[in-house]
Image (spheres, rainbow, N blue to C red):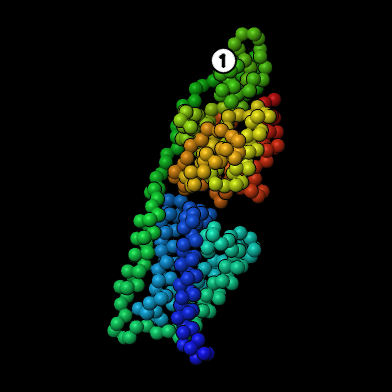
Amino acid sequence: MMSNIKKHLPLIVRILVSALFLLSAVAKLFPIWAFEKQLVDLAIIDWCYAPHLARLIIALETAIAIAILQKHYLKTFVVPVTIILLIGFCAHLGIQMVEHGALNGNCGCFGQLIPMTPLEAFIKNVITILLLIYLYRNVENKPKGENKFVVILFIYFLSAFIMFFFFPFCPCSKTKSPQIVVPDITSDSSTTDSSIIVQTETEDTLKDKGLVVVKQKDTAKKIEVDLGPAKAVSKFAIYNNFSGKPVNLDEGKKIVCLFVPGCDHCRDAAKELAILKKKNNLPPIYIIFMDEETFKIPEFFTETKSNFPYFVLSDIPAFFKLLGNKATTPGINYLWNGNIIKAYQGIEDQKFNASELVRIITSNQK
């Protein structure tokens, strides 16, 4: 019995290691954008090339899972390269543990499917290295003269082809900053505050622009309003159509949300905003949805009891650029004339604070 186990142990270990790498590869695919974002957050690469690198890494893990089960250059190439790769991962995890703590965050080894702390991943890699060392001592290549390196290359390039074919993405495009022509506004000579001007408009028109009536100067159409900070071009300016209607996000006061349709925290934030909108005179609210589980958008509005104008941003890297460096959803931004007065993101230190937002908007109205 023991002799049979010992005889088949190398094969059992190979299957175990293969399954581990295959699980790691598959787990990173759901969703693949999360793995791409992790590469960007680690400053390994920028968003333009993150989709390429993510697919090449997943293809490598898939290729290792297959190559470990065959015998072409198994001992002299496949096993040693895998050991070196895992040592590199361990070094990276060691740096992460020193900088951020051994038990903080998700290393991303198994994507979002199986969250693992850096310490857990480090231990997993060390155990895998020990298994590979055992394999190195107990397996052989194919007989001399029968090894073909082209088999190893074919396995990797086939894995890469499958990744790029079945998980396509839009090539990175360098978008120029939009130019918005802002009309000159002459300050009223009777006031010393350059942010307070007299403008001939109706009160309804001003409210549509997100401006707040501070004081009605007379019964005519002249209304004294606080136009806030000087007009700027925000990173949201190029997005100007929500629910089929043209919108200038940089004009007046706006609340711009960055949500994922299936994100529970995004739904919680949307619920709070819907309640605030009914109770307070909030600026217009617009949602930019990430192109992930978009079929859940009707469910999103039903659950949150809201009906904010929205559009779906199909360019996922662009979505995260809007969200901010290393930021996570939900993202909520209060804009005034293109200036971001307050930004919330994620569920930790910078998470959405409804009462604070109301206080900031109210203070701006005085």
Outermost front residue: 1
Badge 1: residue crowd in 10 Å (few <14, some 14–19, many ≥20): few
Is residue 360 placed above or below 268 in the rendered structure?
A: above
Q: Residue at x 54, y 59 (%)?
A: 113
Q: Position of residue 316 (x, y in %)?
A: 47, 47
Type of the residue with mark 1: Glu
**Which image quadrant is residue 203 in?**
top right
Q: Position of residue 94 (x, y in %)?
A: 58, 68
Is residue 143 placed above or below 212 in the rendered structure?
A: below
Outermost top residue: 219
Q: Which residue is mark 1?
A: 201
Q: Judge from the rendering whether residue 325 lies leftward or rightward of residue 163; answer left or right.
A: right
Q: Judge from the rendering whether residue 105 lies leftward or rightward of residue 234; answer left or right.
A: right
Q: Position of residue 252 (x, y in %)?
A: 57, 27
Q: Of 223 and 179, which appears nearest the observer?
A: 223
Q: Residue at x 63, y 43 (%)?
A: 268
Q: Residue at x 56, y 51 (%)?
A: 326
Which element type, helix, strand or loop, lies under badge 1? loop
Q: Position of residue 76 (x, y in %)?
A: 39, 80
Can residue 209 be seen in the rendering of this structure? yes
Q: Of 303 and 195, which appears nearest the observer?
A: 303
Can residue 318 be seen in the rendering of this structure? no
